[in-house]
Amino acid sequence: MRLRNALALAALTTAAAVPVAHALAPVPAVAAPPECGAENARDFPLATRIQEAPATYAAGGDFLTWNLGLTNTTAQPCRGIHPVLVLTDRERTLRPAQIRAEFYDAGARIWRPVTFEGTDRAESVGVFGGTEETEEEGTVGAVGTGDGPTGAPTPPPAFTGFAVPPHRTLTVPVRLAFRADTVPDEVVVNAAVVQRRGDDGDWVGESGDYTLTVLPAAPAAPADPPATRRPAPADPARPTPKGTAPLPARPELARTGRESAVRLAPAAAALVAAGAGLVLLARRHRSRGTHRHA
């Protein structure tokens, strides 16, 4: 059976030891869930598909939503499931900070962020394991209810992975966008799936490639032309004497319109050094073997 790159496993299993913003948070020490599928199985236990995904994205555009389908082909439930997105662009110019991605956690009823880390092969790898909410989905109670000990909004629970019942399909909504400074390019998205088992993990699923095109950012709307004022009429209380030339109108500065008070600052935030450990092994090479255990 094919083993996908060992990097996402490293990202998943080391996240508990490396505090990176939005990365997979540490979970309490509990018994590891049963293995998802037989150790010596020839096929992945979770059939993984990217579904209903758009072909094009405009740089700087809004989120576009698609689904990640996880089908459990075994007779046992698969718990502690963490999908991992790997993005590779043709020109190798895409940066992790230019990718915006979120997945919907139906249990907590919130969208959770996916933060990407780069590899030395110009890949961007993001684990489904965010712990901060970004938007509530028409509900009150999961977050923001003010029922904390000091009246502050209650934070959402940590994400401990999906559970996929036997012979059932779990559909995970995903939304993706690219920031305005993204270079137009062709990008290949692949979703791999890891079962976290304590401090270890198993590779349990992998999707086919999803190819998309990033289009140039939409041109900015033209600014309104500066407003002009007509010369003021002569003061009727002070008529111009006969035989003299009229005085020129007092010079007046033309209005220049409303100026923006906000200027975009150059992006200067660097990747957290500790986060580099999550992606050092992020490789998309494939190998063949007879087991899935990392």
Image (cartoon, rainbow, N blue to C red):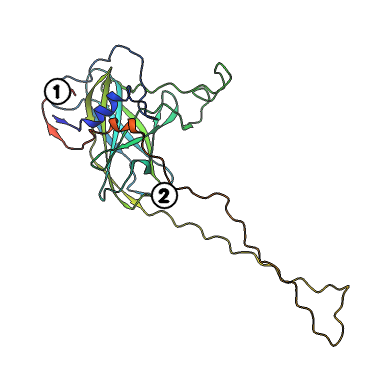
Tell me what residue is drawn at x 22 percent, y 26 percent: 204
**Picture quarter with the C terminus:** top left
The spot of residue 252 in percent (x, y) is: 70, 68
In the picture of the structure, the residue carrying the numbered disc 2 is 180
The spot of residue 58 in percent (x, y) is: 39, 50
Q: Is residue 127 visible?
A: no
Secondary element at tag 2 = loop
Q: Quadrant of residue 68?
A: top left
**Marks 1 and 2, how far apart in space?**
44 Å
In the picture of the structure, the residue carrying the numbered disc 1 is 41
Q: Residue furthest bottom?
A: 243
Q: Quadrant of residue 38?
A: top left
Left or right of 226? Residue 61 is: left
Q: Nearer the viewer, residue 79 or 129?
A: 129
Say above or below: 289 vs 75.
below
Front label number (1 vs 2): 2
Q: Quadrant of residue 100?
A: top left
Secondary element at tag 1 = loop
**Picture quarter with the N terminus:** top left
Tell me what residue is drawn at x 59 percent, y 64 percent: 225
Q: Please, what is the three-letter code of the amino acid marked with disc 1?
A: Ala
User: Which callout, 1 or 2, points at the residue further toward the start of the chain?
Assistant: 1
